[in-house]
Image (cartoon, helix red, strand yellow):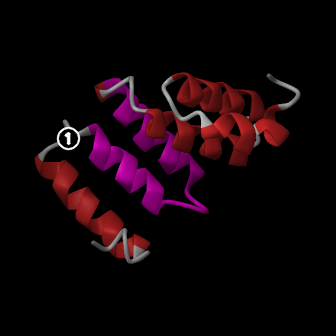
Amino acid sequence: MYLALRENKLAKKDFDIYLKRDSSDAKVYINRAATRFPNGFKGIVYDCNKAIALDSTDKNAYFLRGLAYYGLGEKQKGCDDFQKSIDLGFEILMEAESYKCRDFW
């Protein structure tokens, strides 16, 4: 609920508590990653890596990690993740991120 209300700090606390009890749900890591924007890029990469380890087919994990890598200045890695997300069905990214990745695609 807090995430939907854009109460990121409160949402992150809830996700932290949940993950202490059950760390096997990729969606929880993805949602926690979303609470870390716009300043927690390293934490986003960490959460997305955990999510991908649990479910390597989740396009949202690659998309969020791509945004984080791009924000960290690792543009090639970011664009690689955007491409993986596109390959998994997040087709709108082909157009949405093309300006960022024109040198890599």
Categorize mark 1 by other alpha carbons within 10 Å: few (<14), some (14-19), many (20+): some
Residue 83 is situated, as x and y percent measured from the top left of the image, at 64, 26
Q: Residue furthest right?
A: 103
- The residue that appears at 44% across and 51% down in the rendered structure is 33
Q: Which span of residues is magenta-colored? A: 26-53
**In the rendered image, which quarter contains the N terminus?**
bottom left
Q: Could you say which is closer to the camera, residue 93 or residue 50?
A: 93
Residue 31 is situated, as x and y percent measured from the top left of the image, at 36, 53
89 vs 96, left or right, is: left
Q: Residue type at mark 1: give it.
A: Ser
99 vs 47, left or right, is: right
- The residue that appears at 86% across and 31% down in the rendered structure is 102
- The residue that appears at 58% across and 29% down in the rendered structure is 86
Image: 76 above or below 67 = above
- The residue that appears at 39% across and 24% down in the rendered structure is 57
Residue 13, magenta (yes or no): no
Please give the residue where the numbered disc 1 appears in the rendered image: 23
Q: Main secondary structure of the magenta part?
A: helix
Residue 49 is situated, as x and y percent measured from the top left of the image, at 43, 32
Q: Could you say which is closer to the camera, residue 42 or residue 36?
A: 36
Image: 58 above or below 73 = above
101 vs 83, left or right, is: right
Residue 72 visible somewhere in the drawing: no
Residue 22 is situated, as x and y percent measured from the top left of the image, at 13, 44
